[in-house]
Amino acid sequence: MSRFNLNNKFKAVVIGGSAGSFQGIVKILSSLPQSFPLPIIMCLHRLKHVRNGFVEALSIKSIAEVTEPYDKENIKKGHVYLAPANYHMSVELGHYFGLSTEQMINNSRPAIDITLNTAAYVYRDKLIGILLSGANRDGGMGMKNIKDRGGLTIVQDPTECMIDTMPKAALNLTTIDYTLKIDEIVNFLKELHKQYK
Amino acid sequence: MEIDISDLKRITELVKTNHGYDFTNYAMSSFKRRIVRILEMQSMTMDVLMKKLYEKKFLEDFLNEITVNVTEMFRDPPFWRVLRDDIIPAILLNHQKIRIWHAGCSSGEEVFSMAIMLKEMGIYDNASLIATDLDTNILERAKTGSYNLKSMELNEKNYIRYQGESTLKDYYKESNGMAVLDPSLIDNVSYRKHDLVLGDVFNKFDLILCRNVMIYFNQTLQNEVLKKFHESLFKYGYLAIGSKESLIWCDIANKFIVVNNEEKVYKKIKD
């Protein structure tokens, strides 16, 4: 029996991360089962003025291809998306991305809250939100929104985080379904994959 | 704060009917965030906002908030290198004079960047620039060319990565905590109010810059605006959009070819 209460209703996974999350992200992307059935939408804090390198570094390690979407690009299952440098990334009704250059939020552009909030709005209870290590509170409100709209919430176990401010902010703001170490997040995603076979 | 699509519709209809601006086809999530931002900053309810929107004075503030005015000088330095090294020289092969339109110029950082680039290339006097925006307040600010000193740090960094010929400090003076750009830089610039959504085609250009503007429009509106740009370009003229924008899903994409995919510079090849 799995410790996770899972089914195949989910339509997307959204992941937020900041300082100290890179290794965890790499671990997750490199352990992902082949032909993962959902889109994985990632918003990671990154240097604003370095456009190149990050997505390539993740792509090398990842099982699925990682791309930075264009504005209005359709969201496809099995793809991994990364919010581009210096743009906020929203999920729009109709399942495509919208990019914007609005002011920074939580000192960040891309801001995790924007990606999580808009994904929660579009996917409602069919969204899984995962928040990893990070040094500010960005993503906390987004996780609350995901929970409020019936989605499933996971944070990286603060004891494993290099910097635990971000997952702790989420734990303070809302109910988190699972607090997991990276290896357990990988197991969770593998279990989830099985639901779609 | 959560607002409904029906609230957004009420707002766009009121503004369209009473003031002649059409936000109907703005991209949903960013437009919604702009509205929420106005409500929160002015601690207003939706009902109060709806009443205030009848006032002409308030409408100016509203336009200023709805349009996103976050920009930088020499944003994406590699883009500016492509302009300097490839695009502008290619235009000058066929045209003595170079006509440039900054569509949605916001607070004008891009216009000053262009002027500095053209000066350093020694061809400023061959250029005429038109800078337009929907928002008259931001146009006034754009003309003054005064930016807060803090933002100049980022602008200077961009300029260095662009590999400009001197330092940005040569182009501005400090005054009351602001960086005031040399007004002679905009001698050849004409600033005009123009609405990309409802406005007409008004001139022909060799180069149009509309970077990170159409991301605030939905695809219907992007299509319409692209048609206007197509009409506003000489054959073989260039269109530059933001690095994460794409024309490929527009109706008339086949009338352009991509000249530089990384920096998103397109060339009109068919009338």
Image (cartoon, coloured by chain):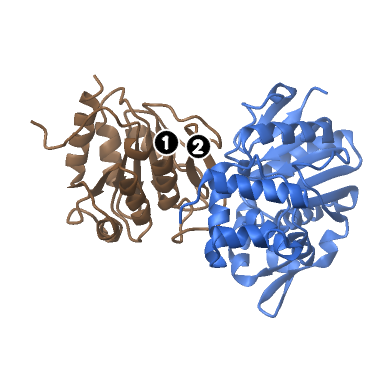
Q: Residues within 10 Å of mark 2 (few under 14, many from 20)?
A: many
Would you place residue B187 above or below residue A65 in this image?
A: below
> Residue at point 69% right, 25% down?
B253
Q: Quadrant of residue B270?
A: top right
Percent from the top left, x then y, of residue A9? 29, 29
Q: Residues within 10 Å of mark 1 (few under 14, many from 20)?
A: many
Mark 2: secondary structure: strand
Q: Colour of chain A?
A: brown
On the picture, is A68 further left or further right than A3? right
User: Is residue A105 visible in this depiction of the protein?
Assistant: yes
Say how many tags the image has.
2
Would you place residue B263 above or below residue B195 in this image?
A: above
> Residue at point 53% right, 67% down?
B43
On the picture, is A181 further left or further right than B214? left
Labels 2 & 1 near each other (Cβ < 8 A): yes
Residue farthest to the left, as pictured: A1
**Which quadrant does the C terminus of chain B fall into?**
top right
- The chain under label 2 reads A
Name the residue carrying label 1: A81
Query: What residue type is disc 2 on?
Result: Phe
Tell me the tag on residue A97: 2
Instruction: Please name which of the two marks, 2 or 1, marks the residue nearer to the observer.
Output: 2
User: Is residue A100 visible in this depiction of the protein?
Assistant: no
Letter of the chain in blue: B
Percent from the top left, x then y, of residue A168? 25, 59
Seen from the viewer's position, the closer of residues B241 and A3 is A3
Seen from the viewer's position, the closer of residues B35 and A55 is B35
> Residue at point 75% right, 23% down?
B255
Compute the Cα span from label 2 to label 1: 10 Å
